[in-house]
Amino acid sequence: MSNAASSFRPLCHVVIPCAGSGSRAGGQGPKQYQMLAGEPMVMHTLRAFAAVTDLARVVLVTAPHDASMPALLAALGDGRFETVAIGSAARADSVLAGLQHLGATGADDADWVLVHDAARCLITPALIDQLMHACSDDAVGGLLALPLPDTLKVAQGGRGVATLARDDKWLAQTPQMFRLGMLRDALQAARSQGFAGITDEASAMERLGLSVRLVQGHAQNFKLTYPQDFDLAEAVLLARRHGP
């Protein structure tokens, strides 16, 4: 259970795509199973969502022949979590497959769905609660994000040629929270164009002309992509484990 008492009541599900190879991480096999602070990386992600009591179902969308995730869920011991081995290398395809699975197994189009990157394993129950409360009465939904703190350059041929204003720039994070039916329809529309320009769920919603709520995230909620990211994430996890 998360520390903060929650009054969030509408039915809410989670889709976590876990079918990618994570080749940039430099390890052996999919990066979600690389060891981090004594456990496979994805277990830290799963434990954060397991601590949020207001979630109805959590769907892990894996590659068709993934034999690792069922064992991890058995160790987690939370009946809300399930694996569906219908994912693909394209993240948007895996998310859409997870949404379609939810709809085919009883979820309503009006239900909320949180989509989260498995590789953002430093997500906390408090951040998840924060997003859920901020978006629960929103007409569209939203995402965790951070105002851009750094100077943003335009590059040509490896050289900076211009500086962009950063006042209105935000760094998108996950989870991202939208109604199941709206997000499924947005992704299905984008699929007809090969998901061109769709880098997250919010971009699919924006393609429909919708504006999404930006909810302040946290700098520690970064996505593990490169080998050095694992070193930083392990340091954060160990610091959390030992407390202040």
Image: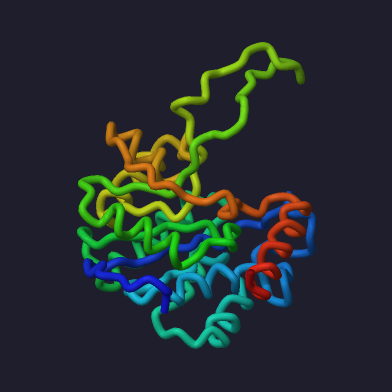
**How has the structure been colored for display?**
rainbow
> Which quadrant would residue 149 be assigned to in this image?
top right
Residue 64 in the figure: left or right of residue 56: right
Q: Nearer the viewer, residue 197 or 128?
A: 128
Residue 206 point in image, percent of width and height: 34, 35
Q: Residue at x 40, y 52 (%)?
A: 176
* Camera sees residue 19: no
Residue 207 in the figure: left or right of residue 32: left
Q: Residue at x 40, y 54 (%)?
A: 96
Residue 150 point in image, percent of width and height: 61, 31
Residue 22 in the figure: left or right of residue 79: right
Compared to residue 59, the image places residue 75 above or below, namely below
Q: Nearer the viewer, residue 172 or 24?
A: 172
Compared to residue 66, the image places residue 188 above or below, namely above
Tell which residue pokes out farthest to the front in this image: 244
On-image quarter of the C terminus: bottom right
Q: Nearer the viewer, residue 90 or 179?
A: 179
* Camera sees residue 240: yes
Residue 135 point in image, percent of width and height: 29, 53
Residue 37 point in image, percent of width and height: 72, 72
